[in-house]
Amino acid sequence: MLTAEQIQSNWEEFCENINTHISSPRKEKLLEFYEKYADRIMMMPAAHKKEYHNAFPGGYVEHVNRVVRCALKQAKLWEEEGADMSTFTTEELVFSAINHDLGKMGDEEHESYIPQTDKWRKEKLGEDYMFNKQVPFASVPDRGLFMLQLHGVQYSFNEMIAIQTHDGLYDNANEKYLKVFMPEQKPRTSLPYILHQADLMAARIEFEREWLPKFKNSVPTQGENFTLSKESKKSTKDKALSQLESKGLKDLFDKL
Ligand SMILES: [Fe+2]
């Protein structure tokens, strides 16, 4: 969970990325758009299920900022290895990263993710949020691009393809761009691959930060198939021994 101060400073980093990397007049249009929805976007989770990455208040902006940082670093790596960096601009890279998950916000009136009202799903399935049925279905990239055009924010062809395909081949819909064998049908720029790698990297890091410490400290509960550590095996044995009254049986178990 993030503190109010972290949520605020993540929002400042988010706006700073627009100020630094997006040129006028698009910069002003984009800032106007994000200011309009600031309260909603600042508090949004990055997913509706807590098993997914950053599914907590403020998780969306934290994720997007990480994707921007990873995208800039990935681009350097691609450049060092000889990728043709003249096929896209840094502005296109950052714009795509900032807006790649925008479709998660929902539409003008309604948020996509609202607090879960079903107690069973919240407790058993870990769904702290649920999809808002008032929002008609659209894929995340489609809705994000729709919201941008609705608010007069133009995007380039490169940005459109990068946002559309940011999930890589995790989304079958991207096969038409990414699983093709004819050279003329392949993307003419590495931008979609760089953005996808940055998103993958950020989501993986968020998973590790949130979940690996929980696995380290986990205590087996009934029905879970955990391998007991030496310490927990010892305490289980001590507990069992303390419950035995017969000294003979105690000695027998203690030797096991
Ligand atoms: Fe993402």
Image: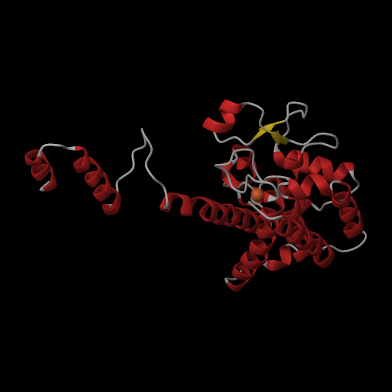
Res 111 seen here: yes
Q: Residue 108: x percent and y percent?
A: 85, 37
Q: Nearer the viewer, residue 173 or 146?
A: 146
At horizontal 63% and vertical 59% (from top left) the residue drawn is: 194
Q: Residue furthest bottom?
A: 80
Res 179 seen here: no
Q: Residue furthest left?
A: 248
Q: How is the image coloured?
A: secondary structure
Q: Is residue 228 above or below residue 21?
A: above
Classify residue 78 as left or right of residue 146: left
At horizontal 60% and vertical 38% (from top left) the residue drawn is: 49
Q: Residue 87: x percent and y percent?
A: 72, 63
Q: Is residue 177 above or below residue 109?
A: below
Q: Residue 167: x percent and y percent?
A: 62, 46
Q: Nearer the viewer, residue 170 or 83?
A: 170
At horizontal 91% and vertical 58% (from top left) the residue drawn is: 28
Instruction: State which quadrant residue 191 falls in.
Output: bottom right
